[in-house]
Amino acid sequence: MVELFLSASLKCASTGMKEKMFEALERINKRPEPFEFYTANDLWTDEHTSAQMLSFHLNEAIDVSSRNAKFINQSVEWIVSEFNIGKDTKIADFGCGPGLYATRLAKHRANVTGIDFSTRSIAYARAVAAREQLNISYVEQNYLDFETQDRFDLVLMIMCDFCALSPTQRKKMLSNFHRVLKPGGSVLLDVYSLVAFDQREEVATYAVNLLHGFWSPNKYHGFLNTFKYEKEKVVLDKYTIIESERTRTVYNWLQYFASEDLEKAFQDAGFSVQGLYSDVRGIPYDRNSGEFAMIATRA
Ligand SMILES: C[S@@+](CC[C@H](N)C(=O)[O-])C[C@H]1O[C@@H](n2cnc3c(N)ncnc32)[C@H](O)[C@@H]1O
């Protein structure tokens, strides 16, 4: 009798577990609507992942989180000459990270404001500015909510951060840019192109400690589901991170752009487009490039 009961309960437990496992896998593999969830915070400001991000930013040889040091030096040189950066040129750097651009531009005597919601990156950037006595003000804040009485000659958003925003957030950003720029002031930003979109593929992968422990110092099971949205030209890298005590889903969205669509978005927001480039070093525009940069001026 006891045996019968035990065997029945075991069967129930294993059926229940199977259902739970099935439901969990369904959730993990579910394709959300484009930009349905915004979790940029989890990627950039979490205690553990922000430390990984900062070490990538500061690794001068790689193009992760920030581009490599040679690229950034060339980019700053071009920005300085293109925008005639000099004493008291006012620059706002949205998503400034640890201040790799802000620091260099301040050394060219610009007055820089850097906005970023990563406590760790802002603390690093502030320490550099204090040590080197640079004219930089760092604001630790979500840049979507940034408001100021200051007016700038130049707004930067570098390393394709604009692509991580939903259409509504992009509209809001463009209106923020417009508001904080002086008349005749410019925006310089870069985005991924449709060439890069065509190179992306849908995948579903699983690994213990996916990305070599990037997501947690503890053991975890990591799933990466990449979804492509053909009509919208959007790609989602959806990470599901399962630790013994918590489960997180982080949505890493990327919008890929046709140059005409980006131009139109800026024009609709009251800008006139001054130029297209292959990247923020001012390399001439090439339609085969995986990314491109744009300068737009507040009309
Ligand atoms: C790809 S990194 C680029 C950093 C820097 N522009 C560079 O090229 O070195 C993006 C930066 O934007 C910040 N960021 C992302 N979303 C943000 C948001 N909503 N508000 C403020 N900062 C944000 C991240 O913390 C990160 O430092």
Image (cartoon, helix red, strand yellow):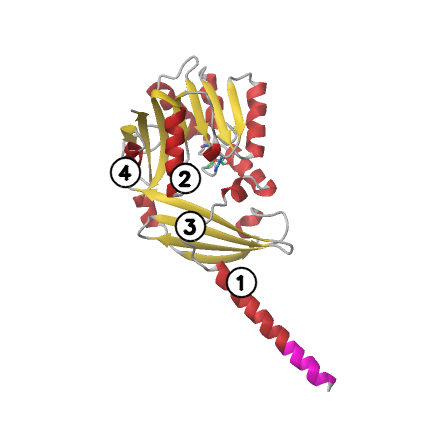
Q: Earlier in the sequence, mark 2 or mark 4?
A: 2
- Residue at image point 49% right, 29% down: 115
Q: Earlier in the sequence, mark 2 or mark 3?
A: 2
Q: Earlier in the sequence, mark 1 or mark 2?
A: 1
Point out residue 82 in the picture as x, y percentages from the top left corner: 33, 21
Highlighted magenta segment, given as a residue range = 2-11
Q: Amino acid at mark 2?
A: Gln
- Residue 136: mark: none
Res 112 seen here:
yes
Which residue has dot 2 on it?
A: 169
Point out residue 45 in the picture as x, y percentages from the top left corner: 56, 39
Task: Calculate the distance from the C-alpha at mark 4 to the C-alpha at mark 1.
Answer: 40 Å
Q: Earlier in the sequence, mark 1 or mark 3?
A: 1
Q: Where is residue 276, by image quadrant?
A: top left
Tell which tag, 2 or 3, sits nearer the viewer.
2
Which residue has dot 3 on it?
A: 236
Q: In this orientation, which residue lies closer to the viewer: 12 or 80?
A: 12
Which residue has dot 1 on it?
A: 24
Q: Is residue 101 left or right of residue 281?
A: right
Q: Where is residue 282, by image quadrant?
A: top left
- Residue at image point 42% right, 20% down: 151
